[in-house]
Amino acid sequence: MAAGHEPVIADSHVNSRASVLPRLEELSGTRIESHAFDLRDVDKTSALFADGHFDAVIHFAGLKAVGESSEMPLEYYDNNLGTTFAILRAMERHGVRTLVFSSSATVYGETERVPMPEELPTSSTNPYGWTKVMQEQILRDVAATGSVQVALLRYFNPVGAPPSGRIGEDPRGIPNNLMPFISRVAVGRRERLQVFGGDYPTPDGTALRDYIHVEDLAAGHVAALQYLSTHRDVQVREWNLGTGHGTSVLEMVAAFEAGSGQTVPYEIVGRRAGDLGAVYADATRAEAELGWRATRTIEDMCTDTWRWQEANPQGYPA
Ligand code: WQD
């Protein structure tokens, strides 16, 4: 919106709360049209496009927990591919030709190569990652017909919240991801952090990840939309959205304690199955082609996360 776009939201709220919507309107100072339905529903999705006259779609609608995807693979394939099929059908029916897709560094699979460039082959070791690999392939093949133009944005580890603290990450149940777990320990909702592995070949033995502030991530989407609108000859292209730097689990814990003034008790336990020791982006392509790079620091990520969590200890109202 700050860039002049007029978004319409469609969300099943299977992993979000509708109580975020009034806060978005408070932050933007204007009404935001939103629709609550399952985006696998081709007719409802198409009806939205019939009324909307959209210029572009940003497709975030996906289940995203790696561990959970191994417990319920069918739900992950059905939801993540089904939403993409319905959105592509609706775009085709209503002549919408621009799509920005939320992909993931998970598509790089088990490679030990860091920093990770976009040229790496894609594969996965879990159903969630396979849904992203498959969606990228589906989108490449549909883009090759010339009917749509696609930006594939490969997120590394999104964290943080807008500085207002009025919206933020609020996963249901026990958080799978590091940052929401740390912030719940800091606010007293969880007793201590389990650090998964202290014997990686890294400076402090704990795993490195490329954490990127969600505000930088959002700016990357605006830059991708802009790029597609001024490069109509480009059918499909992938870009890493990361900082290019690796931060360890213990470095993140220390930064969060410094940023929040709270202690984060932890114990180092065994490695989590499937985790890699180091994952961080080669972020040079997005800077060269989109004119975008991440600017927020680890400290920003921690202080912004804490401002949200401290003001909303239980997350969003039900
Ligand atoms: C980060 C680091 C853990 C929790 C996943 C998905 C990826 C993307 C981002 C969707 C790792 C360690 C974590 C905890 C810990 N999601 N950790 N204790 O695994 O890098 O990536 O989320 O696109 O696809 O794979 O993120 O936040 O789970 O873990 O020590 O309680 O923190 O071992 O080193 P990950 P994460």
Image (cartoon, rainbow, N blue to C red):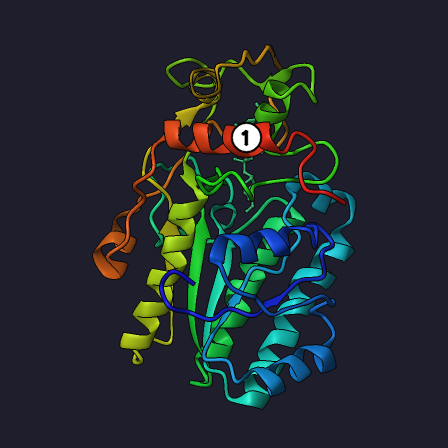
Please tell me in which quadrant of the rendered image residue 317 appears.
Answer: top right
Question: What residue is at 62 percent from the left and 27 percent from the top?
Answer: 181
Image-based side of 75 in relation to 26, left or right: right
Task: Please say if 318 is above or below 47.
Answer: above
Q: Position of residue 194 (x, y in %)?
A: 63, 17
Would residue 59 be found to the left or right of residue 227 on screen? Answer: right
- On screen, residue 128 versus residue 158, left or right, reads right
Can you give x and y, in whole percent of width and height, for residue 209 in the image? 44, 32
Residue 93 in the image, given as x and y percentages of width and height: 59, 89
Q: Where in the figure is residue 222, as x and y percent of width and height?
A: 37, 62
Q: Is residue 250 above or below residue 59?
A: above
Read off the residue under disc 1: 179
Of the pair 191 and 162, the residue shown nearer to us: 162
Q: Please report the residue visible at 47 percent of the width from the left and 41 percent of the height from the top.
A: 164
The reply to whether the residue tagged 1 has its Cβ within 8 angstroms of ligand 1 is yes
Left or right of 247 in this view: 44: right
Q: Secondary structure at mark 1?
A: helix
Q: How many marks?
A: 1
Q: Residues within 10 Å of mark 1 (few under 14, many from 20)?
A: many
Work out whether residue 156 can be spotted. Answer: no
- Kind of residue sitting beneath label 1: Met
In-front residue for pair 108/282: 282
Q: Quadrant of ligand 1?
A: top right
Residue at (41, 36) in percent of width and height: 210
